[in-house]
Amino acid sequence: MAKRKRGPDGPLSDSPPDLHILVAGREEPLPAHRRVLSLFSGVVDGLPSNTDGSPTPWDLRGLVLEGESGPVASAVVERWLDAVYHFSRVDASRRPQLPSTLAEARPLLLLADAVGTAQGLMDSLGGALADRPDLALTVAVGDLKVDLQLKGRIHFITQGDLCYMTSRETAPAYGHVLVAKEAFQPHKAAFPSAVALELESWLHLAGRLNLVPLARALMGFVKAELTGSACSILHSTISTVISPRVFQFMPRELMFEAFARDMLMDRPAYINVMVPEVQVTATTPLAAAYFNMLVGSTAKGTAVLGKDARVLVGVEGAMALVTTTVGGLAPDVCAKLVKEAVAAALEDE
């Protein structure tokens, strides 16, 4: 059977826009197709139609998003329109220009929530945002504003500088300076608290909007930043991140995973293995980044008893506390069981 062909301009090529969106700071309305938007926005679906057949007005000039002081900007509304047309596949060419920082993405997500965007489209929007490899959390302390990339980095404070480490398959790079001591020192004491507060706010919002991929990206960032100890940007303030409202709005899928993973992987039996010299193999990118090694490579290290009765392993100056558990399932087996159990639980809901 021959594939059905569409016109050069897509399925709406013969349908003039019949919805005029009025936004602050713009004289001309933004044109849209009501029959498209009404499928993906509860607010649009409830708009009264004009009896004379003229385009339906949708006035957003008085819409002030949560945390904002003025009406929603035209650019934000246009970005939401692009997302609706693109992710609904009505007009795939209207690919939304998703920002690289969560701070810039916040108005878009809040607008989508305010106009009752369908969850399926919210999932697509949140997933596309979380998939950005350069997605960053913006942390502001006084006059200092820093973008902390969520993936592929571990941030740390050393000798007064704010730095980060990355892992690569070849030529590992260690200790990139993100903010030099002169600029960072006045804000050093307050920085971990600012990071924790920003993370808590975003975990709450991601949960409230049920954006599972975005919540996963934020959780991955938390786990990475807890790798270090004294030099970590989050160790001392992690309790702030685990707030009651984060629990309250956490997507059920992630709560199910947490329960299953805790039961399967949190072992009650701990031991310390003490030898004067150890061989350390970096089996994951995160470990490779921390010890400045290539993924899969092996290096000689030292092992001493740390201050909290755990073993402190060192490789060429990089030190990390190591927790060794007895028994249990292999990580890959555990991951498979968790995935299957959660899928079954969600299917039964």
Image (tube, grey):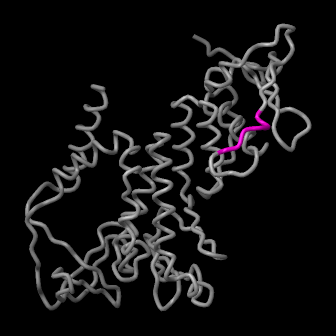
Taking the spot 83% from the left edge, 41% from the top edge, the residue there is: 24
Q: What range of the chain is rendered magenta?
A: 60-65
| Magenta-drawn stretch, dominant element (helix, strand or loop) | loop
Q: Is residue 174 left or right of residue 181?
A: left
Image quadrant containing the N terminus: top right
Is residue 25 depicted above or below 50 in this figure?
Answer: below
Taking the spot 65% from the left edge, 25% from the top edge, the residue there is: 43
Is residue 50 depicted above or below 189 in this figure?
Answer: above
Q: Is residue 62 magenta?
A: yes
Is residue 21 depicted above or below 224 in this figure?
Answer: above
Q: Is residue 326 magenta?
A: no
Q: Please state the horizontal and vertical placement of residue 301, each as a whole percent of the image.
A: 25, 87
Q: Is residue 347 left or right of residue 219?
A: left
Q: Is residue 194 left or right of residue 45?
A: left
Is residue 38 depicted above or below 143 in this figure?
Answer: above
Q: Is residue 214 left or right of residue 129?
A: left
Looking at this view, name the residue that lies furthest to the top.
51
For the image, the number of numbered tags is 0
Q: Please state the horizontal and vertical placement of residue 204, each as a whole percent of the image.
A: 46, 50
Taking the spot 30% from the left edge, 73% from the top edge, the residue there is: 282
Image quadrant containing the C terminus: top left
Taking the spot 82% from the left edge, 33% from the top edge, the residue there is: 22
Please tell me in which quadrant of the rendered image residue 133 appears: bottom right
Q: Please state the horizontal and vertical placement of residue 176, each as a whole percent of the image.
A: 53, 81
Q: Please state the horizontal and vertical placement of residue 314, each as a whole percent of the image.
A: 28, 86
Looking at this view, name the residue that lies furthest to the right.
27
Along the viewing direction, whichever of 273 and 115 lies nearer the viewer: 115
